[in-house]
Image: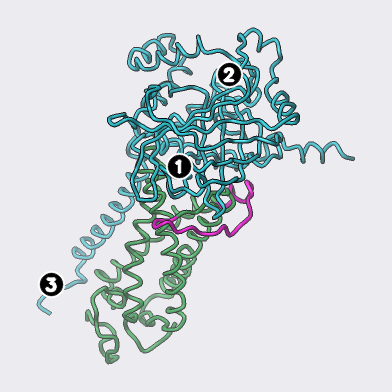
Chain colours: A cyan, B green
């Protein structure tokens, strides 16, 4: 024992300081990893909170695309997609589908004619159980180029500063395209007359392992009858849900499933830039919607249409949005799942009205 | 819990240090991934799920090994309260090691998320789809993570306390270096 006395008070205090240092370092790194020391980090919580109107979110509902209706049906694959993706759902065959038509609004009671963006959440299940989920909108391009810009857009649109939107559009010139589309694109009176676009670029992986950057679109086979916003307004605040219910009740509704392959050099990381019409396009099948159910007790209600839930044969690209959407959708899902007491279930309404 | 050994067995020590690294990585990945919308979110999530399943498998093996091999007795002169805290904290550590992956798996199941791991592995759901269950499970998973991390910090502090201040052989009993397992009882307090 040539060492100094390990029990001297000075050494004990020194060791206690070392132990305290280890604990503080551990807790500090944990706090850093959790983002508590980085107030500028864009977290899913911040992004989801920014979606809410100034009056607060609609509890129990999706934090965006809150107004919607469930559908089910099939995807009829014609086999063409197997050239670019080994995903089971592209092999010739018929696969069950679950989905949701929706309006791009955080307000589940928003009048139909006040919401410019319409969407479709879709889940296709392959025979081996592999699930593909996608959430698409009728816009042909995304309003902004990055998730941070989207967050800034939400902040600006809810800002009380009258100059907020002007300074946002100045900083994000790509947003002007959305303004142009919102003004000039025709309205329709049916979810069945809308095209739905992935916007984000993904990678299809074929049987040889080769990767193909793609985007996809569902094009309506129903004839499109454009109307003005005033004409849609006259149909009432809740026209779209009964309309699609009645229409699908008459006959199944169909969409052509098109894959657009990127040209060499096409940017895959910016969904605000649409790819032009000179890209190679493959029609891989038909979506057939044969049943509509209200969201309240419908099969889509508790489904998170997270666009990163992909089968083997489809992968994310360097587009930053799918990851951001996945993180934010998960947050939205967790929030609404813990708010079921605020959600207007039919079951509860029926129970409370039964003596 | 009593035995002749003054060290944990070699498999126990190997499991302890391997899992120490995995559990710390897991907790950091967990708090990191839920606080970002960046592209790394997806890789972190896939790693979190894969590592979680590996931890669950190792924790169950470790539990069996612990039940079979036992643990060295704590020093006879350790105050009763510290012995109690030591025993309770070990029960709690085992609880979290097993409960956290099961809660994670359960909350993914209740949310109807496909559970895909690295390497294309696909786990079956262990619970039916239920928003109410999902809410309870993710909250438990979330709050338990902080409790687990706090407990690990306490565990590290206690280990260093034994190593530096008490020097009673408790730290050495789980030391990563292969120290001979059986020793004469005179060496129960090697630091003396």
Q: Is residue A207 above or below residue A228?
A: below
Q: Nearer the viewer, residue B53 or B25?
A: B53
A350 sits left or right of A304 in the view: right
Q: Do the numbered discs 2 and 3 sit on residues whose CB atoms are within 8 Å?
A: no
Question: Please, which chain is the residue tagged with disc 3 on?
Answer: A
Q: Which mark sits nearer the N-terminus, 2 or 3?
A: 3
Q: CA distance from mark 2 to mark 3?
A: 77 Å
- Label 3's element? loop
Mark 2 neighbour density, 10 Å: few (under 14) some (14–19) many (20 or more):
few
Q: Is residue A33 magenta?
A: no
Which marked residue is nearer to the observer: mark 2 or mark 1? 1
Identify the residue shown where x is 23% and y is 76%: B177
The magenta span reads: B117-137
Judging by the rendered image, the residue that carries numbered circle 2 is A115
Residue B79, placed above or below residue B150 = below
> Residue B170 appears at what percent x and percent y?
32, 76
The image's mark for residue A308 is 1
Nearer mark to the viewer, of 1 and 3: 1
Viewer-nearest of discs 2 and 3 = 2
């Amino acid at each position: 024992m040539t060492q100094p006395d390990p029990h001297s008070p000075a050494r004990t205090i020194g060791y206690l300081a070392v132990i305290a240092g280890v604990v503080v370092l551990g807790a500090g790194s944990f706090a850093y990893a959790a983002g508590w020391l980085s107030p500028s980090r864009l977290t899913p919580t911040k992004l989801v909170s920014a979606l809410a109107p100034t009056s607060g979110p609609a509890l129990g509902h999706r934090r965006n695309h809150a107004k919607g209706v469930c559908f089910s049906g099939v995807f009829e694959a014609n086999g063409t997609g197997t050239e670019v993706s080994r995903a089971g759902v592209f092999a010739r065959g018929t696969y069950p589908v679950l989905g949701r038509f929706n309006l791009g609004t955080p307000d589940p009671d928003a009048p139909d004619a006040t919401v410019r963006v319409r969407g479709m959440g879709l889940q296709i299940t392959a025979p081996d159980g592999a699930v593909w989920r996608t959430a698409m909108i009728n816009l042909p391009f995304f309003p902004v180029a990055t998730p941070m810009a989207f967050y800034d857009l939400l902040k600006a649109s809810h800002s009380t500063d009258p100059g907020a939107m002007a300074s946002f559009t100045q900083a994000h010139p790509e947003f002007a395209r959305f303004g142009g589309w919102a003004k000039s694109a025709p309205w329709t009176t049916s979810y069945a007359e809308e095209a739905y676009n992935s916007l984000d670029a993904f990678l299809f992986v074929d049987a040889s392992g080769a990767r193909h950057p793609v985007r996809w679109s569902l094009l309506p086979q129903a004839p499109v009858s454009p109307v003005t916003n005033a004409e849609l307004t006259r149909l009432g605040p809740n026209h779209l849900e009964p309309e699609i219910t009645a229409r699908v009740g008459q006959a199944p509704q169909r969409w052509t499933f098109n894959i657009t392959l990127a040209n060499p050099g096409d940017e895959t990381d910016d969904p605000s830039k649409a790819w032009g019409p000179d890209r190679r396009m493959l029609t891989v099948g038909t979506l057939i919607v044969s049943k509509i159910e209200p969201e309240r007790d419908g099969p889509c209600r508790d489904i998170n249409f997270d666009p990163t839930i992909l089968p083997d044969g489809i992968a994310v690209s360097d587009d930053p949005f799918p990851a951001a959407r996945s993180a934010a959708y998960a947050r939205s899902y967790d929030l609404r799942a813990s708010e079921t007491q605020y959600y207007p279930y039919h079951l509860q309404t029926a129970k409370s009205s039964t003596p | 819990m009593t035995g002749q050994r003054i060290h944990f067995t070699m498999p126990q020590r190997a499991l302890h240090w391997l899992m120490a690294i995995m559990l710390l990585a897991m907790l950091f990945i967990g708090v990191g991934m839920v606080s970002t919308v960046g592209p790394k979110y997806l890789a972190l999530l896939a790693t979190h799920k894969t590592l979680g399943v590996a931890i669950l498998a190792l924790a169950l093996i470790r539990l069996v090994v612990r039940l079979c091999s036992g643990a060295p007795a704590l020093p006879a002169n350790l105050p009763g309260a510290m012995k109690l805290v030591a025993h309770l904290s070990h029960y709690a550590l085992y609880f979290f090691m097993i409960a956290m992956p099961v809660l994670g798996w359960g909350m993914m199941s209740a949310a109807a998320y496909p559970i895909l791991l690295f390497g294309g592995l696909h786990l079956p759901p262990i619970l039916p789809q239920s928003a109410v269950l999902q809410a309870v499970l993710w909250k438990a998973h979330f709050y338990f993570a902080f409790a687990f991390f706090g407990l690990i910090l306490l565990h590290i502090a206690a280990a260093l306390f034994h190593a530096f201040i008490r020097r009673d052989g408790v730290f050495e009993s789980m030391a990563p270096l292969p120290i001979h397992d059986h020793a004469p009882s005179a060496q129960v307090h090697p630091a003396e």
